Amino acid sequence: MPKLNPWCAAACLTLALGSTPLRAADDQPCDPAGCVRTAYGLLELKSAADGASTLALDGDALKTFDRPAQIRAAYPDREQASLVLIETRDAKSCAMYRVLEMKSKDEVRLGAEFGNCQALVADSERERYAVAQSVVFENGEWRFAIAPANAQDTHAEWYAYREGKIYKSQVVAGKSADPEAAALKNLEAEVPDKEKRDALIRAHGSAANAYRWLLLQRGLELDPRKARRK
Protein backbone atom coordinates (compact mmCIF):
# COMPACT_ATOMS: atom_id res chain seq x y z
CA MET A 1 0.00 0.00 0.00
CA PRO A 2 1.26 3.53 -0.73
CA LYS A 3 2.50 5.63 2.19
CA LEU A 4 1.49 9.24 2.79
CA ASN A 5 4.24 11.56 1.61
CA PRO A 6 4.71 14.92 3.42
CA TRP A 7 5.32 16.57 0.00
CA CYS A 8 1.59 16.16 -0.64
CA ALA A 9 -0.03 18.89 1.49
CA ALA A 10 -3.73 19.73 2.00
CA ALA A 11 -4.12 20.58 -1.67
CA CYS A 12 -3.67 17.00 -2.82
CA LEU A 13 -4.23 13.39 -1.85
CA THR A 14 -2.07 10.30 -1.91
CA LEU A 15 -4.30 7.64 -3.46
CA ALA A 16 -4.30 4.06 -2.23
CA LEU A 17 -4.69 1.24 -4.72
CA GLY A 18 -7.98 -0.58 -4.20
CA SER A 19 -9.07 -4.03 -5.22
CA THR A 20 -11.86 -3.32 -7.71
CA PRO A 21 -11.12 -5.36 -10.86
CA LEU A 22 -11.23 -2.95 -13.79
CA ARG A 23 -8.41 -4.41 -15.89
CA ALA A 24 -8.64 -3.80 -19.62
CA ALA A 25 -7.45 -6.25 -22.24
CA ASP A 26 -3.93 -5.57 -23.50
CA ASP A 27 -5.17 -5.24 -27.05
CA GLN A 28 -8.00 -2.86 -26.20
CA PRO A 29 -7.74 0.50 -28.05
CA CYS A 30 -6.97 3.43 -25.75
CA ASP A 31 -9.76 6.01 -26.04
CA PRO A 32 -8.11 9.45 -25.50
CA ALA A 33 -10.95 10.59 -23.22
CA GLY A 34 -10.94 7.41 -21.20
CA CYS A 35 -7.37 6.16 -20.87
CA VAL A 36 -3.71 7.04 -21.12
CA ARG A 37 -0.54 4.97 -20.80
CA THR A 38 1.97 5.77 -18.08
CA ALA A 39 5.36 4.37 -17.11
CA TYR A 40 3.54 2.43 -14.37
CA GLY A 41 0.61 0.98 -16.31
CA LEU A 42 -2.62 1.85 -18.08
CA LEU A 43 -4.61 4.65 -16.45
CA GLU A 44 -8.35 4.42 -17.20
CA LEU A 45 -11.62 6.17 -16.43
CA LYS A 46 -14.65 3.87 -16.25
CA SER A 47 -18.21 5.26 -16.33
CA ALA A 48 -21.03 3.82 -14.21
CA ALA A 49 -24.76 3.85 -14.89
CA ASP A 50 -25.33 6.45 -12.16
CA GLY A 51 -22.98 8.92 -13.87
CA ALA A 52 -20.02 8.31 -11.55
CA SER A 53 -16.52 7.67 -12.93
CA THR A 54 -13.84 5.40 -11.48
CA LEU A 55 -10.16 6.04 -12.09
CA ALA A 56 -8.02 2.90 -12.19
CA LEU A 57 -4.36 2.01 -12.78
CA ASP A 58 -3.88 -1.36 -14.48
CA GLY A 59 -7.32 -2.40 -13.23
CA ASP A 60 -6.84 -1.32 -9.60
CA ALA A 61 -9.27 1.39 -8.49
CA LEU A 62 -7.65 4.66 -7.39
CA LYS A 63 -10.49 7.15 -7.08
CA THR A 64 -14.23 7.41 -7.77
CA PHE A 65 -15.72 10.71 -8.92
CA ASP A 66 -19.44 11.21 -8.30
CA ARG A 67 -19.90 12.71 -11.77
CA PRO A 68 -18.77 12.11 -15.37
CA ALA A 69 -15.03 12.52 -15.93
CA GLN A 70 -12.64 12.40 -18.85
CA ILE A 71 -8.93 12.75 -19.54
CA ARG A 72 -8.18 16.02 -21.33
CA ALA A 73 -4.36 16.09 -21.54
CA ALA A 74 -1.19 14.20 -20.59
CA TYR A 75 2.45 15.21 -20.15
CA PRO A 76 4.95 14.53 -21.64
CA ASP A 77 2.80 12.36 -23.91
CA ARG A 78 0.07 9.71 -23.88
CA GLU A 79 2.50 6.79 -24.03
CA GLN A 80 4.64 7.69 -20.99
CA ALA A 81 2.46 10.17 -19.07
CA SER A 82 3.60 11.45 -15.69
CA LEU A 83 0.98 14.23 -15.43
CA VAL A 84 -2.67 13.78 -16.41
CA LEU A 85 -5.37 16.46 -16.58
CA ILE A 86 -8.83 15.18 -15.58
CA GLU A 87 -12.04 17.11 -16.29
CA THR A 88 -15.28 16.48 -14.38
CA ARG A 89 -18.72 17.93 -15.12
CA ASP A 90 -21.74 18.14 -12.84
CA ALA A 91 -25.42 18.07 -13.81
CA LYS A 92 -25.23 21.77 -14.76
CA SER A 93 -22.23 21.10 -17.03
CA CYS A 94 -19.85 22.97 -14.71
CA ALA A 95 -16.37 21.88 -15.81
CA MET A 96 -13.72 21.54 -13.11
CA TYR A 97 -10.20 20.12 -13.32
CA ARG A 98 -7.65 18.15 -11.30
CA VAL A 99 -4.06 17.15 -12.08
CA LEU A 100 -2.99 13.60 -11.33
CA GLU A 101 0.75 13.11 -10.89
CA MET A 102 2.39 9.71 -11.23
CA LYS A 103 5.44 9.62 -8.93
CA SER A 104 5.73 5.82 -8.88
CA LYS A 105 3.55 2.71 -9.12
CA ASP A 106 2.53 3.17 -5.48
CA GLU A 107 2.60 6.97 -5.29
CA VAL A 108 -0.18 8.60 -7.30
CA ARG A 109 -1.20 12.13 -6.33
CA LEU A 110 -4.44 13.87 -7.19
CA GLY A 111 -4.27 17.65 -6.88
CA ALA A 112 -6.90 20.10 -5.66
CA GLU A 113 -9.90 20.81 -7.88
CA PHE A 114 -9.69 24.08 -9.83
CA GLY A 115 -11.46 26.05 -12.55
CA ASN A 116 -14.32 28.49 -13.10
CA CYS A 117 -16.98 26.08 -14.47
CA GLN A 118 -15.88 26.82 -18.05
CA ALA A 119 -13.98 24.47 -20.36
CA LEU A 120 -10.43 24.66 -21.68
CA VAL A 121 -10.12 27.10 -24.57
CA ALA A 122 -11.11 25.19 -27.71
CA ASP A 123 -8.91 25.21 -30.81
CA SER A 124 -11.56 27.26 -32.62
CA GLU A 125 -11.41 29.95 -29.89
CA ARG A 126 -7.65 30.29 -29.49
CA GLU A 127 -7.44 33.37 -31.71
CA ARG A 128 -10.26 35.09 -29.83
CA TYR A 129 -8.50 34.59 -26.49
CA ALA A 130 -4.98 35.19 -27.89
CA VAL A 131 -3.52 31.85 -26.80
CA ALA A 132 -1.31 29.61 -28.91
CA GLN A 133 -2.27 26.43 -27.01
CA SER A 134 -4.73 25.81 -24.19
CA VAL A 135 -2.37 23.34 -22.45
CA VAL A 136 1.37 24.09 -22.31
CA PHE A 137 4.37 23.02 -20.24
CA GLU A 138 6.95 25.73 -19.70
CA ASN A 139 9.43 26.78 -17.03
CA GLY A 140 8.62 23.74 -14.92
CA GLU A 141 4.87 24.47 -14.87
CA TRP A 142 1.93 22.77 -16.54
CA ARG A 143 -0.38 25.62 -17.57
CA PHE A 144 -4.02 25.63 -18.68
CA ALA A 145 -6.04 28.32 -20.49
CA ILE A 146 -9.70 28.18 -19.47
CA ALA A 147 -12.46 30.21 -21.13
CA PRO A 148 -13.50 33.20 -18.98
CA ALA A 149 -16.64 32.99 -16.86
CA ASN A 150 -17.88 36.21 -18.48
CA ALA A 151 -18.82 35.43 -22.08
CA GLN A 152 -17.98 39.03 -23.11
CA ASP A 153 -14.42 38.80 -21.79
CA THR A 154 -11.69 38.04 -24.34
CA HIS A 155 -8.98 37.11 -21.82
CA ALA A 156 -8.55 33.45 -20.94
CA GLU A 157 -8.08 32.52 -17.29
CA TRP A 158 -4.76 30.75 -16.78
CA TYR A 159 -4.08 28.18 -14.07
CA ALA A 160 -0.75 26.47 -13.42
CA TYR A 161 0.37 23.27 -11.69
CA ARG A 162 3.79 23.33 -10.05
CA GLU A 163 5.30 21.28 -7.23
CA GLY A 164 1.96 19.76 -6.26
CA LYS A 165 0.14 23.09 -6.11
CA ILE A 166 -2.32 24.86 -8.37
CA TYR A 167 -2.41 28.63 -8.65
CA LYS A 168 -4.15 31.16 -10.86
CA SER A 169 -2.36 33.89 -12.80
CA GLN A 170 -4.21 37.18 -12.68
CA VAL A 171 -2.67 38.62 -15.85
CA VAL A 172 -1.10 36.51 -18.59
CA ALA A 173 0.94 37.92 -21.43
CA GLY A 174 -0.50 37.41 -24.92
CA LYS A 175 1.31 36.24 -28.02
CA SER A 176 3.24 39.50 -28.49
CA ALA A 177 3.13 40.87 -24.92
CA ASP A 178 6.06 41.00 -22.52
CA PRO A 179 5.58 38.28 -19.83
CA GLU A 180 7.80 40.20 -17.40
CA ALA A 181 5.55 43.26 -17.72
CA ALA A 182 2.48 41.11 -17.06
CA ALA A 183 4.13 39.58 -13.99
CA LEU A 184 5.10 43.02 -12.70
CA LYS A 185 1.48 44.19 -13.02
CA ASN A 186 0.35 41.15 -11.02
CA LEU A 187 3.01 41.78 -8.40
CA GLU A 188 2.01 45.44 -8.05
CA ALA A 189 -1.55 44.35 -7.26
CA GLU A 190 -0.38 41.88 -4.63
CA VAL A 191 2.41 43.99 -3.07
CA PRO A 192 1.48 47.72 -3.26
CA ASP A 193 4.56 48.77 -1.24
CA LYS A 194 7.26 49.53 -3.83
CA GLU A 195 10.20 48.89 -1.49
CA LYS A 196 8.87 45.45 -0.52
CA ARG A 197 8.06 44.69 -4.15
CA ASP A 198 11.53 45.67 -5.33
CA ALA A 199 13.09 43.58 -2.57
CA LEU A 200 11.11 40.54 -3.73
CA ILE A 201 12.22 41.09 -7.33
CA ARG A 202 15.87 41.39 -6.26
CA ALA A 203 15.62 38.26 -4.12
CA HIS A 204 14.12 36.15 -6.90
CA GLY A 205 15.85 37.66 -9.93
CA SER A 206 12.76 38.84 -11.83
CA ALA A 207 9.16 39.96 -11.37
CA ALA A 208 7.98 36.68 -12.91
CA ASN A 209 9.92 34.58 -10.41
CA ALA A 210 8.86 36.80 -7.49
CA TYR A 211 5.18 36.58 -8.45
CA ARG A 212 5.37 32.80 -8.91
CA TRP A 213 6.99 32.44 -5.48
CA LEU A 214 4.32 34.65 -3.90
CA LEU A 215 1.50 32.54 -5.34
CA LEU A 216 3.10 29.28 -4.31
CA GLN A 217 3.50 30.57 -0.77
CA ARG A 218 -0.07 31.76 -0.56
CA GLY A 219 -1.82 28.60 -1.77
CA LEU A 220 -4.94 30.07 -3.38
CA GLU A 221 -8.46 28.68 -2.94
CA LEU A 222 -9.48 28.15 -6.56
CA ASP A 223 -12.87 26.39 -6.38
CA PRO A 224 -15.54 29.01 -7.33
CA ARG A 225 -18.16 26.97 -5.47
CA LYS A 226 -16.45 27.58 -2.13
CA ALA A 227 -16.59 30.79 -0.14
CA ARG A 228 -13.42 32.82 -0.62
CA ARG A 229 -11.27 33.46 2.43
CA LYS A 230 -10.90 37.10 3.41
Image (cartoon, grey):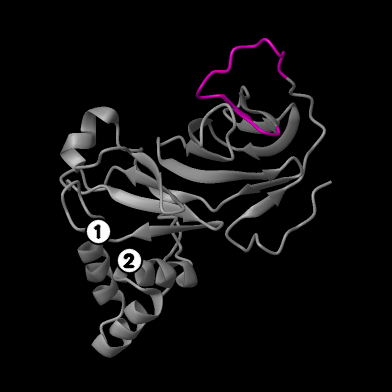
Q: Is residue 183 above or below residue 73?
A: below
Magenta residues, as a range? 24-40
Judge from the rendering whether residue 128 lies leftward or rightward of residue 90; answer left or right.
Answer: left
Residue annotated with mark 1: 179
Q: Looking at this rendering, what residue extends furthest in the bottom direction?
A: 195
**58 in the magenta segment:** no
Circle 2 packing at 10 Å, graded few (<14), some (14-19), many (20+), is many
Picture coordinates of residue 72 (x, y %)? 46, 32
At 57% from the left and 28% from the top, the residue drawn is: 51
Residue on which disc 2 sits: 208
Q: Which mark is residue 19?
A: none
Q: Position of residue 97 (x, y in %)?
A: 47, 43
Label 1 is placed on what type of residue? Pro
Image quadrant assignment for residue 26: top right
Say what amino acid the circle numbered 2 marks.
Ala
Residue at x 59% of width, y 40% of height? 82
Residue 158 to residue 93: above or below: below
Q: Is 169 above or below relative to 189?
A: above
At x 34%, y 41%, the residue is: 118
**In the foreground, 144 or 47:** 144
The percent position of residue 52, horizontal first and vertical second, equals 60, 31
Can you tell which quarter of the image residue 63 is in? top right
Q: Could you classify mark 1 by the number of other residues whose Cα lies within 10 Å: few (under 14), some (14-19), or many (20 or more)?
A: some
Do the numbered discs 2 and 1 sit on residues whose CB atoms are within 8 Å?
A: yes
